[in-house]
Amino acid sequence: MSNTDIEIVVEDPTAPEANSPAVTSVRAVDVVVCLLLLALALTLGYDNWRTGAGWESTGPQSGYFPFYLSIILGSASLYGLAAAFLSRKEASEIFVTRAQLRRVTAVLVPTMLFCLAMQFFGLYVASFLLIAGFMRMVGKIALWKSLLTALVFTAVMFVTFDITFDVIMPKGPLEAALGR
């Protein structure tokens, strides 16, 4: 048998697991998002009313347009709440299963840690850690390949931004020690 006769079967990674329990429904997510947007609209509306949402002899005050945009946002949020409570279909629809949420969390948590690490270690060290971590943990790629790829990518990024284009990027203590 030649190598061209070997068939490689790859499962669809986006296919949901058949036995994964539901975490939440579409209606619950719709209600929470509409309530958050309504709270934002009320906050923005109050703040813009406080700074001036009227019309002066020279034109609109500073809060005029944002105030009316917050009214539109609040109205849309109330419409979304009413639609969510009146819809029978969305009450039974699954928004996310436990397996899907686990996969989203596997990307979200490291990305949030990257943003936090960038504040302390700088862009390049944080990028190195993110790339190497994703390749090793999520991609299950060999450690040496993960470290080498992260190092090459970070070095290319450093040369491109810091040296070639002279763009100021967030620096950490390692870059400061290297004199950059």
Image (spheres, grey):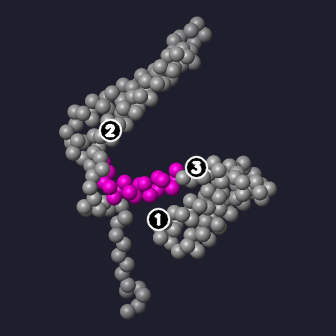
Distance from disc 3 to disc 2, alpha carbons, whole Å, reads 29 Å
Which residue occupies the foreground of this view, 68 or 142?
142
**Residue at 56% across, 59% down:** 130
**Residue at 29% across, 47% down:** 24
Question: Residue 175's image quarter?
Answer: bottom right
Which residue occupies the foreground of this view, 62 or 25?
25
Spot the residue most to the bottom: 1
Q: Position of residue 51 (x, y in %)?
A: 55, 16
Disc 3 secondary structure class: helix
Q: Is residue 97 magenta?
A: yes
**Who comes first in sequence, dot 1 or dot 2?**
2
Residue 23 higher or lower than 71, as above or below:
below
* Residue beneath disc 1: 138
* Residue beneath disc 3: 116
Disc 1 secondary structure class: helix
For marks 3 and 2, give the one nearer the viewer.
3
Q: Amino acid at mark 3?
A: Leu
Distance from disc 1 to disc 2, alpha carbons, whole Å, reads 30 Å
Disc 2 secondary structure class: helix
Spot the residue most to the top: 57
The magenta stretch spans which residues?
95-112
Q: Is residue 77 left or right of residue 62?
A: left
* Residue beneath disc 2: 30
For marks 1 and 2, give the one nearer the viewer.
1
Q: Residues within 10 Å of mark 2 (few under 14, many from 20)?
A: some
Does residue 69 appear in this view?
no
**Residue at 44% across, 29% down:** 40
For marks 3 and 1, give the one nearer the viewer.
3
Q: Amino acid at mark 1?
A: Val
Q: Residues within 10 Å of mark 3 (few under 14, many from 20)?
A: few
